[in-house]
């Protein structure tokens, strides 16, 4: 069995940095194709798949016989990963070909297919295809299946095709990848927009600016209303979260409500709205709106309406709506206008008949705010005007498909087979191409629904409309923003489709396959890499009904095999939903048995040549692996081990930079952990507690040292150390406690963390005596003051003198007080080459000082000079190990600022190593510069 790179070492900090950076990337990112919740970062998936297939140098002792040779080769492979995970390099063929060549070399030219039975948003299958691998994606959720088809199955079928829209093919001499397909999506989408405007454009009037010139409307801001419960008032009271429209300095704007007499209303009065700009009389914090926590207050009489009573009214008679403001397009700014009757009247259109009337699932706290407030069907989440727009665009997809087919045949394509149900070897023709273009146009309609609904809000800090799914739930929105589907502002079909078209990529690999299937029924013919559900986390089947009802209406004739059911299948969804399974215990049993079934089946079909990879995403409440218990985490590990798997590595991956998290003083837990697993032999032996602890103590030190020498952050070390620890635990069929019971995963995790602390403490013995003194003193006092007598006792025990350490410049000893010097208090004139006595402690602290003040080049020069000393050289690996150890001490004591410095030194190691040395002036003279 050849060990793979994922089982030994990863350049984790670079992977994490690029994964975090992805959040700011939109141009061409697959997330802009269609919304899916909690996608894994592309950079992480790309790196994990590569490392899952590529041999670690230790697998070839004949080529790399020494630790140094293996480390050098590992560094070369790390560099490939570091280049490959950069977003801009996914279309750099030189970079990607290097990665593909390594995979072919390690798989004897015959790489296995990659299977993801919980494909979700398609990250793993897409990245497998990008690496030249055959990707198989399956998911029970039809929305996820359609996304995967749009990412890995459809684009390669039409690789290098020219567009068929009249006149477009001649605009370029060559079309590469999916460029022609994307161009046609834009062209036929523009035709749809124009046709829709002819039919319904009159429902969307322009605004009139104060100078009487017409302007495009960016949004209409509405407030839901309810009749005031005070009989003496009875006004239609607006339900408003915030009166603020814009908070940009110098351009502030807010709604000003006032009550006026109006005999046309049953109460004899109504609320009128104007726009204010004077900050001195703006709404104060705490009184900004009329709704808080679901409780409402009347703007006229001050009557209080409790949340439970408001919900009863909403369910029995419904909520009304009133226009509060109009946002218009001005010269480089938003213009906020008071509402006028004409715009309210234009919104009063009849409700279309053919709308999604499927019921919103209840009870489910992720979506049940809709029925709770009188919106029992999915169509109720939209205004009548929005329903008219969405049904119009939905109907136009079918008409656009006819046009695509006509134009494709005119361009000389053979009719061929339809897209749905086509076999892998079928040659695509005009029918399949028309289906493909229509699929993306339909996804554009589905994507539009996310912002063209009465649950989209106006974001007053950025002055733009915000889509519904800012998080994994459907909240109640009291004052909502309605936009026009025309024009070029956020929320228009053209903008929505333009962003989608940028994400139609041809990753360059074989045509992928995306199928609708429960993971319990999946065919495990390939190497598994997957991101399974997380116990009782979000049930995406309920949330995705929001999109499914529109996709089904639009694309059922194009993808009949996907859209067979009225709503997304739910009974088989592998989540511990207590509402669906009759209680918490029943839900727990459903999830755990289903999880075991999936991975037991996968275990029977697993290859012995390659490990599988499984992602686990932590929830915010799971503050620590070893402290607060996590049912999901323990269930995952128990399920894997109980299904016959042995864990060979655990890698913490994050989409937030660890330095930033530490700098904010927040929990540094990784957002996900990737597990590497192999099948445990059927005849695996059992052991007792003593044997388990003995194996841990024997194997963990070497594994820990490899982790420290690799590009991993100290903040991630405890979670990464779970891998080699659980590798020991899971290699046994059972670990017996003294009473004869089997050791639980929770108990094993506790023991692993105890041994980890022991190993870190034992590393102190490898350092020089000055560093050993400083570690003990730092553990007791940090950089605070301590008594001289105490310091003298610690120093004598390590055969050093406090006065000597004072002269060495690592501490100050004054007036019977001793204090270690922090990096920022060290001398900027320090020259390690001229220092008669040097310690690892001193070099590490000066390295932190230089890294923060002068950069990686100066730090590199320091480390090279320290290692090149003829007397008492300081090895760079020792400096890095000390950074890990000090981080562990600082974190346990809550010294966040200290921990940040130690973490930065270790995580910047690759940058320091690759930087051009910047020598001090004196050293440059000596070196002849």
Image (tube, rainbow, N blue to C red):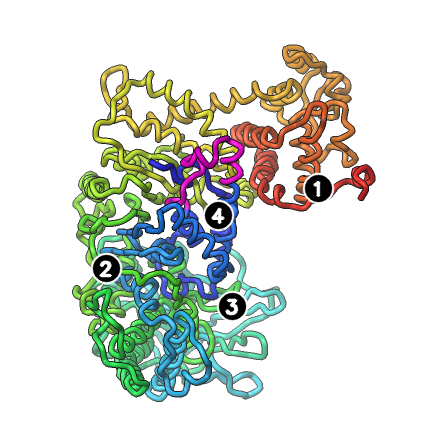
User: Mark 3 or mark 4, which is nearer the start of the sequence?
Assistant: 4
- Measured in 3D between alpha carbons, the distance from the residue under mark 1 to the one under mark 3, in whole angstroms, is 44 Å
Q: CA distance from mark 4 to mark 2?
A: 30 Å
Q: Which residue is mark 1?
A: 858
What residue is shown at x 56% (from left), y 21% (from top)?
764
582 over 477 or under it: above or below: above
Tally the marks: 4
Ranked by sequence position, the earlier of labels 1 and 2 is 2
Residue 85 among those drawn in magenta: no
Q: Earlier in the sequence, mark 4 or mark 2?
A: 4
State the residue in front, 626 or 646. 646
**Which quarter of the picture shows residue 801?**
top right
Figure quadrant of the C terminus: top right
User: Is residue 60 in the magenta section?
Assistant: yes
Residue under label 4? 15
Mark 4 to mark 1: distance in Å?
A: 25 Å
Between 43 and 311, the residue placed more toward the observer is: 43
Q: Is residue 770 left or right of residue 48?
A: right
As rendered, which of 106 and 878 lies closer to the eye? 106
Kindly indicate whether the residue at mark 2 contacts the one at mark 1 (C-beta within 8 angstroms).
no
Write down the residue under mark 2: 515
Q: Which quadrant of the structure image shows residue 493?
A: bottom left
Secondary structure of the residue carrying numbered label 1: helix
Bin the neighbour count of mark 2 within 10 Å (Cα to Cα): few under 14, some 14-19, many 20 and up. Answer: many
- Mark 4 or mark 1, earlier in chain: 4
Q: Which marked residue is nearer to the observer: mark 4 or mark 3? A: 4
Q: Which region of the structure is painted magenta?
A: 51-73
Give above or below for 749 relative to 136.
above
Looking at the image, tell me whether mark 1 or mark 3 is earlier in sequence order. 3
Q: CA distance from mark 1 to mark 2?
A: 54 Å
> In this figure, which residue is indicated by the disc labeled 3?
463
Mark 2 or mark 3, which is nearer to you? 2
């Amino acid at each position: 069995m050849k060990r793979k790179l994922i089982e030994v070492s990863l350049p984790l900090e670079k992977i994490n940095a690029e994964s975090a950076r992805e959040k700011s990337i939109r141009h061409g990112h697959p997330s802009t194709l269609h919304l899916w919740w909690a996608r894994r970062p592309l950079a992480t998936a790309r790196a994990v798949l590569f490392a899952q297939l590529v041999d670690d140098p230790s697998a070839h002792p004949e080529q790399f016989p020494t630790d140094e040779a293996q480390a050098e080769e590992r560094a070369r492979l790390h560099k490939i990963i570091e280049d490959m995970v950069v977003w801009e390099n996914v279309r750099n063929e030189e970079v990607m070909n290097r990665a593909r060549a390594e995979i072919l070399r390690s798989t004897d030219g015959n790489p296995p297919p990659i299977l993801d039975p919980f494909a979700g948003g398609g990250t793993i299958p897409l990245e497998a295809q990008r690496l030249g691998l055959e990707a198989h994606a399956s998911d029970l959720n039809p929305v996820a299946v359609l996304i995967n088809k749009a990412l890995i199955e459809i684009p390669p079928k039409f690789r290098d095709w020219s567009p068929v829209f009249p006149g477009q093919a001649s605009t370029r001499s060559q079309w590469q990848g999916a460029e022609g397909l994307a161009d046609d999506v834009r062209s036929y989408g523009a035709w749809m927009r124009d046709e829709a405007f002819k039919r319904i454009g009159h429902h969307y009037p322009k605004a009139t600016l104060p100078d009487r010139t017409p302007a495009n409307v960016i949004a209409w801001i509405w407030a839901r209303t309810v009749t005031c419960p005070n009989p003496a008032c009875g006004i239609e009271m607006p339900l408003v979260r915030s009166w603020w429209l814009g908070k940009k300095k110098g351009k502030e704007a807010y709604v000003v409500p006032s009550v006026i007499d109006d005999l046309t209303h049953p109460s004899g009065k109504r609320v009128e709205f104007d726009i204010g700009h004077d900050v001195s009389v703006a709404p104060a914090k705490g009184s900004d709106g009329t709704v808080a926590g679901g409780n409402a207050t009347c703007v006229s009489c001050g009557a209080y309406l409790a949340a439970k009573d408001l919900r009863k009214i909403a369910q029995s008679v419904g909520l009304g709506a009133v226009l509060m403001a109009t946002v218009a397009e001005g010269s480089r700014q938003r213009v906020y206008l008071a509402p006028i009757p004409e715009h309210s009247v234009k919104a009063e259109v009849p409700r279309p008949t053919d709308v999604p009337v499927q019921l919103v699932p209840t009870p489910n706290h992720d979506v049940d705010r809709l029925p709770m407030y009188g919106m029992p069907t999915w169509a109720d989440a939209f205004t009548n005007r929005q329903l008219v727009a969405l049904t119009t665009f939905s109907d136009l997809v079918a008409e656009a498909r006819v046009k695509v087919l006509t134009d494709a045949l005119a361009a000389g394509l053979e009719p061929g087979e339809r897209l749905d149900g086509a076999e892998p070897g079928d040659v695509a023709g005009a029918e399949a191409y028309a289906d493909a273009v229509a699929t993306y146009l339909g996804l554009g309609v589905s994507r539009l629904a996310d912002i063209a609904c009465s649950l989209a809000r106006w974001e007053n800090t950025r002055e733009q409309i915000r889509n519904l799914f800012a998080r994994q739930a459907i909240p109640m929105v009291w004052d909502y923003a309605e936009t026009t589907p025309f024009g070029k502002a956020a929320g228009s079909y053209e903008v929505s489709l333009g962003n989608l078209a940028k994400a139609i990529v041809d990753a360059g690999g074989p045509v992928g396959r995306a199928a609708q299937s429960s993971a319990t029924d999946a065919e495990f013919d390939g190497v598994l890499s997957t991101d399974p559900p997380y116990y009782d986390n979000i049930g995406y089947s309920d949330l995705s009904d929001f999109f499914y009802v529109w996709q089904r209406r639009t694309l059922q004739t194009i993808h009949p095999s996907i859209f067979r059911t009225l709503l997304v299948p739910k009974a088989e969804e592998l989540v511990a939903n207590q509402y669906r399974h009759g209680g918490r215990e029943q839900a727990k049993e459903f999830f755990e048995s289903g999880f075991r079934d999936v991975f037991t089946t996968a275990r029977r079909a697993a290859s012995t040549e390659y490990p599988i990879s499984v992602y686990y995403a932590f929830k915010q409440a799971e503050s620590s692996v070893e402290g607060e218990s996590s049912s999901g985490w323990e269930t995952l590990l128990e399920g894997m081990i109980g299904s016959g798997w042995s864990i060979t590595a655990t890698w913490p991956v994050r989409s937030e930079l660890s330095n930033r998290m530490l700098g904010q003083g927040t929990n540094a837990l990784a957002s996900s952990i990737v597990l590497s697993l192999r099948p445990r032999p059927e005849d695996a032996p059992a052991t007792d507690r003593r044997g388990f602890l003995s194996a841990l103590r024997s194997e963990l030190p070497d594994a820990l040292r490899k982790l420290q020498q690799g590009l991993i952050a100290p903040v991630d070390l405890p979670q990464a150390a779970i891998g080699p620890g659980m590798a020991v635990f899971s290699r046994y069929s059972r670990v017996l406690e003294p009473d004869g019971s089997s050791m639980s995963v929770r108990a094993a995790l506790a023991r692993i963390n105890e041994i980890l602390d022991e190993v870190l403490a034992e590393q102190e013995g490898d350092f020089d005596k000055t560093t050993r003194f400083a570690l003990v003193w730092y553990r007791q006092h940090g950089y605070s003051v301590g008594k001289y007598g105490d310091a003298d006792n610690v120093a004598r025990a390590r055969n050093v003198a406090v006065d000597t350490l004072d002269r060495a410049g690592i501490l100050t000893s004054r007036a019977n007080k001793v204090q270690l010097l922090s990096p920022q208090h060290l001398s900027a004139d320090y020259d390690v080459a001229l220092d008669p006595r040097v310690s690892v402690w001193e070099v590490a602290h000066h390295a932190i000082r230089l890294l923060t003040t002068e950069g990686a080049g100066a730090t590199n020069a320091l480390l090279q000079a320290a290692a090149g000393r003829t007397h008492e050289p300081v090895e760079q690996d020792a400096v890095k190990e000390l950074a890990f150890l000090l981080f562990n001490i600082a974190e346990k004591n809550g010294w966040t600022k200290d921990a940040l410095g130690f973490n930065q030194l270790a995580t910047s190691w690759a940058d320091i190593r690759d930087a051009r040395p910047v020598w001090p002036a004196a050293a440059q003279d000596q070196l002849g510069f």
